[in-house]
Image (cartoon, rainbow, N blue to C red):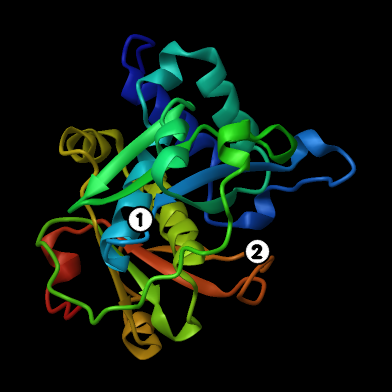
Amino acid sequence: MEETDPLALAHALLSARVSDNRHDRSENPEQQETVQAMQIALHVPKTQPPRRTDLLEAAARAVVAVCLSDRVAGDPSWRAGLEGWYDHLIRKVTRRARNKAWREVQEVPGVTVDVRGAQARAFVPSAVSAVPPPVRKLQIQGTELPPEEPGPVEPGTPLILVDRDLQMTTGKAAAQVGHASMLLAAAQDLGWVRAWAARGFPLNVREVPHAEFAAYLGTPGVVTVRDAGYTEVAPDALTVLALPGDEAHLRGARP
């Protein structure tokens, strides 16, 4: 890896520090600097809220875009934020934003992604005691959007499946698909990631019944997400699966 290749550096850092086993990392509540989190803001206007699926896709893309940003190589604070987070429990906190509050958080370091009008912004991680004020004042609850019937997936595009039977809120599901997108990138080689990044990290998110969700567990290349169990689901519950999206993996997929 050459230091002049920002994506290679960011991907190497992600791959070396992150795994799908949360027990590889820890935190100590008595040492607040070890309790790290990535904050995610979901833009949910009151009059024209986005579709839930579009918002989940925007959140997943925003998270991986922060992890693989060119700024990992060029901005010491960006890299330090990720390193501190990777080394501890990979927490994510999802918040709702609208109107002036949404505009204000665009000034906080992070990446905003728009998917068919649904917008999400993922921020550079920090200690939970040091969340920037414009983000900290955003409401954590209130992001609920109704689930939708699964639609067709785009062939050749990464697929993230959510176990619909867990009945996760929109905010919880957004955090889980964000975890899936970064784990998926960590599990792939640099050439695959480079091609994905060049397209802007497109992906499909689909919420499917548990039986259909479980049928993908044996798929080659599948990446699993198990939750720490702090909110909504039991510890180590399998919440989300991610597939790289080549034709072999998606052949016969119905979501």
Examine the rendered structure and indicate whether residue 2 appears above or below residue 221: above
**In the image, what residue occupies the spot 36% across and 52% down?**
60
What is the secondary structure assignment of the residue under circle 1?
A: loop
Q: Is residue 221 visible?
A: no
Residue at image position (16%, 69%) is: 250
Dot 2 surroundings within 10 Å: few (below 14), some, or many (20 or more)?
some
Q: Is residue 20 left or right of residue 88?
A: left
What amino acid type should be assigned to the residue bearing mark 2? Ala
- 132 shown above or below 236: above
Left or right position of 168 against 93: left
Query: Residue extending furthest bottom?
Result: 211
Q: Which mark is residue 228?
A: 2
Of the numbered discs 1 and 2, the one sitting upstream in the chain is 1
- Where is residue 123 shown, x and y percent of the image? 49, 36
Q: Is residue 14 left or right of residue 8?
A: right
The quarter of the picture where the C terminus appears is bottom left
Residue tagged 1: 45
Q: CA distance from mark 1 to mark 2?
A: 30 Å
Residue 70, by quadrant, is top left
Contact, mark 1 vs mark 2 (Cβ under 8 Å): no
Q: Position of residue 225 (x, y in %)?
A: 49, 63
